[in-house]
Image (cartoon, grey):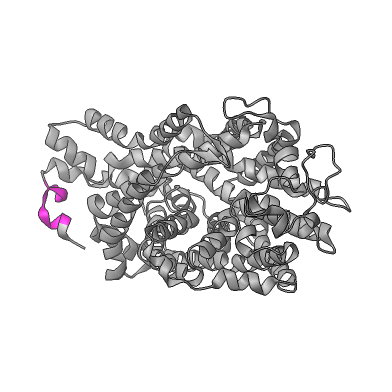
Amino acid sequence: ISGEDVDRETWGKKMDFLLSVIGFAVDLANVWRFPYLCYKNGGGAFLIPYVLFLFIAGMPLFYMELALGQYNREGAATVWKICPIFKGVGYTVIIIALYVGFYYNVIIAWSLYYLFASLTSELPWLNCDNPWNSPNCTEPQHINGTFLGNRTSYAKYKNTPAAEFYERRVLHIHESKGINDLGLPRWELTLCLILVVFILCFSLWKGVKSSGKVVYVTATMPYIVLLVLLIRGITLPGAMNGIRAYLHIDLKKLNNPQVWIDAATQIFFSLGAGFGVLIAFASYNKFDNNCYRDAILTSSINCITSFFSGFAVFSVLGYMAHQHHVNIKDVATEGAGLVFIIYPEAISTLPGSTFFAIVFFIMLLTLGIDSSMGGMEAVITGLSDDFKILKRNRKLFTFAVAFGTFLIALLCITNGGIFVLTLLDRYAAGTSILFGVLIEAIGVSWFYGVDRFSEDIERMMGFKPGIYWRLCWKFVSPAFLLLAVIASIVTSGDLRYDDYIFPRWSNMVGWSIALSSMLFVPIYAIYKLLILPGTFKERIAYGITPEHEHHLVKEGNVRQFKLRHWLSI
């Protein structure tokens, strides 16, 4: 272990680290995206590409990030002392983690708003006689298959009390004409957002000593609630039809490339490799911690959670379909529509609805908050390891990041805020994060070298990674990521929210946001080559040799200039 890292703080207990990683990886997408994707893409058949990609790309990248952080004991930027020219990618992932915080916290603020709104004996999205309801509002009991006709599915029908509560009470989207007509931030949501940012600040200001304790609540709570909702869900009429629809196996779907793209993006975004979070978390581990076991354990738990949450979701969707005499496909939906419209509506019809609403929104809150903590920790650790002045003023810096996040997030809680949020969600961490992890994987396994990386792991844990992991790191994962980058660009399409098509300029703004983080890679590389000493060849040699071996470059002994380095596994 290098001398300057003797004083680096470590996790209080091993469990703090494991729960932090699980809490970060398990987020809203596990509940609102995976079950729907599984249902839409051939049920049980979807698990084939999903599990395949988990093993060939998800787990190897997860393991790589944990080992990288733990061995070098640095955040996402300074970890690149192993190959200085690649440091730009560290900034890329830190910037992306920051961007995600701009809108992710807003979704948590919505959950908090709903939680406060649930503290009544009669839930406010139960009927149509509220001041915010439109004249077209129709109570759910009057809506059935014949009422809807074949124009629209139930999930897309915007005039139920639950849909109007979300769109007219929470978002106030009806007061905005589009992304060029935002209006002022809503004061109720502003208060919720302040509370969310305050919780984040409070959890993170003492580093892993404080955040490692908060996750004991935020990482375990979703499991307790999911279990409660599942037990309630499967006792409802129609629940079994929902679960049958969720698991119905249709292997013909596997001929469709979109299914494979969905599986790949889902596994990648669900595990959260590449946001610099795993590097930051692992950098606070003890040097000899077995991060191989941690990687396998936490990534498996994450995927099992996704699968498990599908039962809680689809048992309730089956009940909804049963109530309205429609097919499952008419109530099945994903994203905010599932957790803020369909599920709350289903809950409101149950006896004891207030209790179930409260626990459900507490679940959403805890699912979101520790993922947001992870992203913020990546920014704070990443930058304070790089700039020592920030490390000395950790508490002030934590507050500054939280406050900056809050200011930009205000854009997302205006009347047209959902349009800003949709734009950020699409562009801030889409192609750019895939690109970032691709560069990271190439930097570690090709430039630094899989063999050298394996020796580092052996130094920590006493055993070398098997040939399977080394092959995945060097060939399979980079190939997977390259295909994913290409697929994400090709399938991007125009941006839309329901029936609203975004203006052309907003796509340009979106791509500018995406490029703003990716450009750190080439710009930093050029900057690095310009400030290094020596001839062009020597500069390249310094740029791709680990900093602790720079004395070898002076002797002209550059291992990257030998073919053996590139061929070794």
Q: Is residue 41 left or right of residue 185?
A: left
Residue 205 at least partly seen: no
Q: Position of residue 566 (x, y in %)?
A: 16, 55
Pick the front one: 444 or 486: 486
Q: Above or below — where is 111 with respect to 44?
A: above
Which residue lies at the image location 68% right of the left edge and 61% below the top edge?
221
Residue 136 in view: yes
Relative placement, left or right, of 119 versus 89 is right
Please check the rendered image and state whether residue 558 is part of the magenta-colored stretch, yes or no: yes
Residue plotted at (48% across, 32% down): 389
Say which of 257 and 104 sits in front. Answer: 257
The quadrant where residue 307 appears: bottom right
Q: Nearer the viewer, residue 220 or 176?
A: 176
Q: Quadrant of the N terminus?
A: bottom left
Give the quadrant of the C terminus: bottom left
Point out the residue furthest to the right here.
121
Q: Residue 567: where, in percent of width, then height?
A: 15, 59
Image spot of residue 375 (x, y percent): 53, 45
Q: Residue at x 44, y 44 (%)?
A: 430
Q: Where, by quadrant of the figure, is residue 168 drawn?
A: top right
**Part of the protein shown in magenta:** 557-566
Q: Is residue 188 above or below residue 144?
A: above
Principal secondary structure, stretch drawn in magenta: helix
